[in-house]
C-alpha cells in the first residue's frame, strides 16, 4: 500500500472519530442543560416553600421584664410567667418569640419580628409582664433600660400597648390577643408631678381581646407563688376546649373570687368571631 492509499484509508476513520466526539459533546451539553434546569426548578420550589412558610397561623410575642435598676428589688414573677406561658403556648401550636429583661431596642425588634410573621389568617398574642405605666390615658410597657424622671420620658422610652395592637392590625391579623400583667405600683411615681396609678383603659381595635391584671387605675401586689396570680389562672384555663374570650373571662372570675374582689382583672373585647388558643 502506497502513501496515497494510506491517507485515503485513514480519512474515513478520522471523520468517524470526529463525529463520535461531536455526538459526545452534544450529549454532555444536553445533560448539563437538563441538570441546570432541574437545579433552577428546585431553587424556585425552595423559594416558593420559604415564602409560604414565612407566616404562621398562631404567633405569640412573650416579654418578661424583671430587673429594673430603679426598682427597689427585682421582680421574680414576670420572667417565670414568660417561661411558663411560652411552654404552654408552644404546646398549643403557637410560634413563640420570648424575650426576657428586654431593653427598648429589644422590644422594638421583637415587635418587628412579630409583624413579619403575621398574615391574614394569623391569630396573634402579645404577653407583657413587668412594669406598666399610664400617661395621657395611654398604657406603656416599660423596658428594663428605661430612664424615667418625668411623664414625657415614659412616652420616649416605653412601648405603647395601643401601638403594638395597631401594628397587628396594620398587618391584617385575623385576631389580636393581649395579656398585660403590669398593674404594679409605679416605681417612678415619686418623680411625677401628676398622679399615675395602674394602667389606663385599653380600647381594643376591631377583632381584638385584651386581658389586664387589674381594673384600670388599680394596682396589684405580687404574691409568693412561682407565677403571678393572673398567669397562674390563665394557665389553668388555657387547655379548655373553649374560645379565647371564655378563657379570659374564666381567668377574670377566678381571680376576683379568690381575692374576694380585691383584684379584678379587666377584659375588653371586640372579637367578631370565636378564637381558640387552647385545646
Image: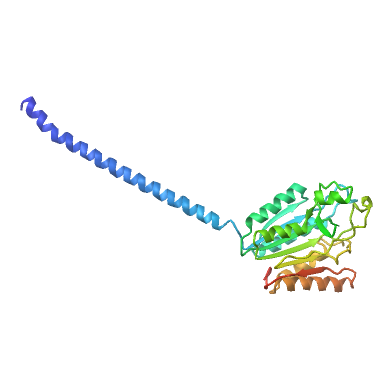
Kindly indicate the quadrant of the structure image that contains residue 224: bottom right
In terms of depth relative to the viewer, which is nearer, 145 or 257? 145
User: The N terminus lies in which quarter of the figure?
Assistant: top left
User: The C terminus lies in which quarter of the figure?
Assistant: bottom right
The residue at the far top in this view is 3
Up the image or down, 157 lies above or below 212; here it is above
Horizontal and vertical percent for residue 166?
A: 72, 59
Q: Is residue 119 left or right of residue 257?
A: left
Instruction: Give the residue at x 38% y 47%.
Output: 35
Instruction: Give the residue at x 84% y 70%.
Output: 255
Mark yes or no: residue 206 visible. yes
Instruction: Give the residue at x 84% y 62%.
Output: 200
Horizontal and vertical percent for residue 103?
A: 77, 48
Up the image or down, 90 lies above or below 106; here it is below
In terms of depth relative to the viewer, which is nearer, 274 or 164? 164
Q: Is residue 200 left or right of residue 118?
A: right
- Give the colour scheme shown: rainbow
In terms of depth relative to the viewer, which is nearer, 87 or 138? 138
The residue at the far left in this view is 1
Horizontal and vertical percent for residue 7?
A: 11, 28
Instruction: Give the residue at x 93% y 57%.
Output: 195
Mark yes or no: residue 103 visible. no
Kindly indicate the quadrant of the structure image that contains residue 119: bottom right
The residue at the far front in this view is 136
Q: Is residue 21 left or right of residue 86?
A: left
Kindly indicate the quadrant of the structure image that contains residue 94: bottom right
Up the image or down, 172 lies above or below 239; here it is above
Amino acid at each position: 500500500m502506497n502513501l496515497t492509499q494510506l491517507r485515503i484509508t485513514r480519512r474515513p476513520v478520522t471523520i468517524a472519530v470526529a463525529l463520535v466526539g461531536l455526538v459526545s459533546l452534544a450529549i454532555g451539553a444536553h445533560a448539563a442543560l437538563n441538570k441546570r434546569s432541574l437545579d433552577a426548578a428546585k431553587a424556585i420550589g425552595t423559594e416558593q416553600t420559604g415564602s409560604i412558610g414565612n407566616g404562621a397561623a398562631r404567633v405569640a410575642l412573650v416579654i418578661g421584664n424583671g430587673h429594673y435598676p430603679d426598682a427597689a428589688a427585682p421582680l421574680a414573677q414576670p420572667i417565670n410567667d414568660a417561661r411558663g406561658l411560652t411552654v404552654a403556648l408552644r404546646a398549643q401550636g403557637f410560634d413563640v418569640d420570648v424575650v426576657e429583661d428586654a431593653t427598648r431596642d429589644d422590644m422594638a425588634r421583637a415587635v418587628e419580628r412579630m409583624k413579619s410573621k403575621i398574615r391574614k389568617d394569623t391569630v396573634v398574642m402579645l404577653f407583657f409582664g413587668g412594669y406598666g405605666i399610664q400617661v395621657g390615658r395611654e398604657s406603656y410597657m416599660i423596658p428594663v433600660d428605661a430612664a424615667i424622671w418625668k411623664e414625657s420620658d415614659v412616652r420616649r422610652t416605653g412601648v405603647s400597648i395601643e401601638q403594638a395592637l395597631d401594628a397587628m392590625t396594620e398587618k391584617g391579623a385575623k385576631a389580636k390577643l393581649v395579656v398585660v400583667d403590669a398593674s404594679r405600683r409605679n416605681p417612678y411615681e415619686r418623680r411625677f408631678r401628676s398622679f399615675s396609678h395602674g394602667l389606663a383603659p385599653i380600647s381594643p381595635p376591631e377583632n381584638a381581646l385584651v386581658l389586664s391584671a387589674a381594673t384600670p387605675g388599680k394596682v396589684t401586689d405580687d404574691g409568693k407563688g412561682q407565677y403571678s396570680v393572673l398567669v397562674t389562672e390563665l394557665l389553668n384555663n388555657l387547655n379548655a376546649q373553649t374560645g379565647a374570650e371564655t378563657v379570659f373571662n374564666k381567668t377574670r372570675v377566678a381571680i376576683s373570687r379568690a381575692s374576694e374582689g380585691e383584684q379584678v382583672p379587666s377584659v375588653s373585647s371586640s372579637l367578631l368571631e370565636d378564637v381558640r388558643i387552647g385545646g
